[in-house]
C-alpha cells in the first residue's frame, strides 16, 4: 500500500522547520497553535500534513508517520472538510468537522469565512471521535476574512488539550497581530538551487530544462514545476523595459503604463510586485558586485546605471515597494493604484509618510 503523503523527514531544504516540528512530535502532550510561514511552494503544507499525521499515527517511525495505517489514511480526505462549505452562507448553522481536516477557500469563493471559523471552534469543543486528537490545518490562512480571524482568537488562546490548529501562509503580515501573537511561528525559507535541481530530477525533468526552471524558480518548487521559463523571462523583460525608461519618461507616465500592464487584478498585481521586489534585490546585489540571479547579463547591464536612482540613497525604495505589496493584501488596496504607487516610489515621488495605515 502506497503512503498517502511524504513523511516529515522527506521535506527538502527546511531542516530548521522540520526539526522544530519533529521536536513537538517527540515531546508528546499538547501542541501550541502553530503558524507555518514562508514563500509559496517551499513545503509548508506538506510539512503541516506530515506533522499532523505523525501526531496520530499508530505505527510511527520516530517523528515520521507511516503513511499507511488507518489513522494515516484519514489524511487522504483532508480537503473534504473545505468542500463541506461550498455553497453555504454565513446564515447557515455550524457543523462539526471530522477529526482531521483542511480548512481552505471553498470552490467559488475567495475567502475563508467566519462560518468556517465557527465550525472549527464547534469541532474543537467536542472530543475526537476516533483519533487521539482533533487537528485542523488552515491554508492559506491569509485568506481568512477579518471576522474569521477574530473569531479564532479565544480558541488560539486556550485550545483544548487534544486540539491542534496549524495556520499556513505565505503572507503572515496579513494576519492580525492579535492572531500572530497567539501562535508559535515556524519559518520556511526559499529552497536552494541544489535542492530544487534534486526535486526536479526526481520528477524526471531533463537537466537542461531543470537548469532553466531553477533559474526562474526564485526558491519555489511549485514555481519550478508549474512556471513557464519563457513567460517568466518575458515578465522580467517587461519590468526591465519599464525601469530602464526612468531617465526618458515622466514617472507618472511609467506608473500609468505599469498599472495598465500589471494592475488588472489583485492576484496579478501581488504576483508582479513579488517579482519587482526580487528584481530590485537582484539589482542591489549586482550593484555590490555580485552576479545576477533573475536578470540576465544584458538586462543587468541595462539597469546598472540606474541602480542608485531606483534603489534610493539609503536603499530604502525597495522596502517601500515591499510595504505596498503587503498592504495590497492586508488592506485590500486597489491593484492599479498599488502598482502606480510602486513605480512612483522608485522615482522618489511616493514616501512612507504618504501612505495611510
Image (cartoon, grey):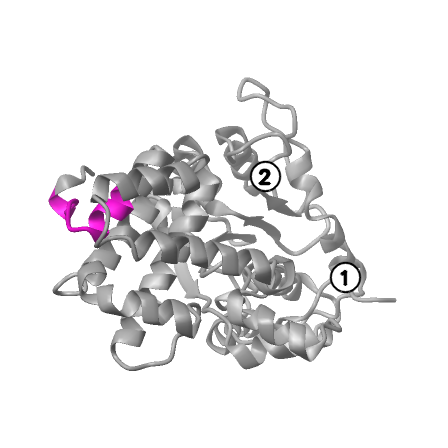
Of labels 2 and 1, earlier in sequence is: 1
- Badge 1 is on which residue? 4
Q: In this view, does 351 lie to the left or right of 320?
A: left
- The C terminus, quarter of image: top left
Residue 120: which quarter of the image? Answer: top right
Which residue is painted at 64% across and 33% down in the image?
107
Range of magenta residues: 341-353
Q: Is residue 107 left or right of residue 165?
A: right
As drawn, which residue projects farthest toward the right? Answer: 1
> Is residue 220 shown above or below 330?
below
Q: How many labels does the image show?
A: 2
- The N terminus, quarter of image: bottom right
> Is residue 17 shown above or below 254?
below
Which residue is painted at 44% across and 58% down in the image?
237
Mark 2, other Cα within 10 Å: few <14 / some 14–19 / many ≥20: many
| Marking on residue 123 | 2
Which residue is painted at 31% across and 55% down in the image?
243
Q: Position of residue 186 (x, y in %)?
A: 43, 65
Q: Nearer the viewer, residue 328 or 17?
A: 328
Residue 203 shows in the view: yes
Q: Nearer the viewer, residue 54 or 259?
A: 259
Amino acid at each position: 500500500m502506497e503512503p498517502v503523503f511524504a513523511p516529515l523527514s522527506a521535506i527538502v531544504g527546511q531542516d530548521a522547520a522540520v526539526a522544530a516540528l519533529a521536536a513537538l512530535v517527540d515531546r508528546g502532550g499538547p501542541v501550541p497553535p502553530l503558524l507555518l510561514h514562508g514563500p509559496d511552494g517551499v513545503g509548508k503544507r506538506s510539512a503541516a500534513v506530515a506533522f499532523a499525521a505523525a501526531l496520530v499515527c499508530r505505527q510511527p517511525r520516530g517523528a515520521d508517520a507511516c503513511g499507511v495505517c488507518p489513522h494515516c489514511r484519514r489524511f487522504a480526505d483532508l480537503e473534504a472538510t473545505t468542500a463541506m462549505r461550498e455553497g453555504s452562507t454565513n446564515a447557515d448553522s455550524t457543523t462539526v468537522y471530522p477529526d482531521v481536516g483542511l480548512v481552505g477557500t471553498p470552490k467559488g469563493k475567495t475567502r475563508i469565512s467566519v462560518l468556517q471559523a465557527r465550525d472549527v471552534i464547534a469541532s474543537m469543543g467536542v472530543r475526537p471521535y476516533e483519533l487521539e486528537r482533533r487537528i485542523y490545518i488552515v491554508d492559506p490562512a491569509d485568506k481568512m476574512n477579518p471576522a474569521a480571524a477574530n473569531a479564532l482568537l479565544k480558541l488560539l488562546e486556550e485550545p483544548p488539550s487534544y486540539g491542534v490548529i496549524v495556520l499556513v501562509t505565505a503572507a503572515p503580515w496579513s494576519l492580525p497581530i492579535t492572531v500572530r501573537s497567539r501562535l508559535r511561528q515556524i519559518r520556511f525559507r526559499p529552497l536552494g538551487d541544489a535542492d530544487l535541481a534534486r526535486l526536479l530530477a526526481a520528477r524526471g525533468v531533463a537537466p537542461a530544462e531543470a537548469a532553466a526552471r531553477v533559474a526562474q524558480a526564485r526558491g519555489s518548487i511549485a514555481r519550478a514545476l508549474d512556471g513557464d521559463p519563457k513567460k517568466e523571462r518575458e515578465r522580467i523583460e517587461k519590468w526591465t523595459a519599464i525601469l530602464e525608461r526612468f531617465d526618458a519618461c515622466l514617472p507618472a507616465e511609467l506608473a500609468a503604463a505599469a498599472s495598465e500592464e500589471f494592475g488588472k487584478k489583485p492576484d496579478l498585481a501581488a504576483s508582479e510586485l513579488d517579482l519587482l521586489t526580487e528584481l530590485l534585490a537582484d539589482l542591489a546585489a549586482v550593484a555590490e558586485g555580485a552576479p545576477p540571479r533573475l536578470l540576465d547579463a544584458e538586462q543587468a547591464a541595462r539597469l546598472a546605471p540606474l541602480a542608485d536612482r531606483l534603489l534610493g540613497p539609503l536603499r530604502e525604495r525597495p522596502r517601500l515597494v515591499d510595504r505596498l505589496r503587503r498592504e495590497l493584501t492586508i488592506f485590500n488596496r486597489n491593484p492599479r493604484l498599488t502598482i502606480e504607487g510602486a513605480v512612483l516610489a522608485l522615482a522618489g515621488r511616493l514616501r512612507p509618510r504618504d501612505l495611510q495605515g
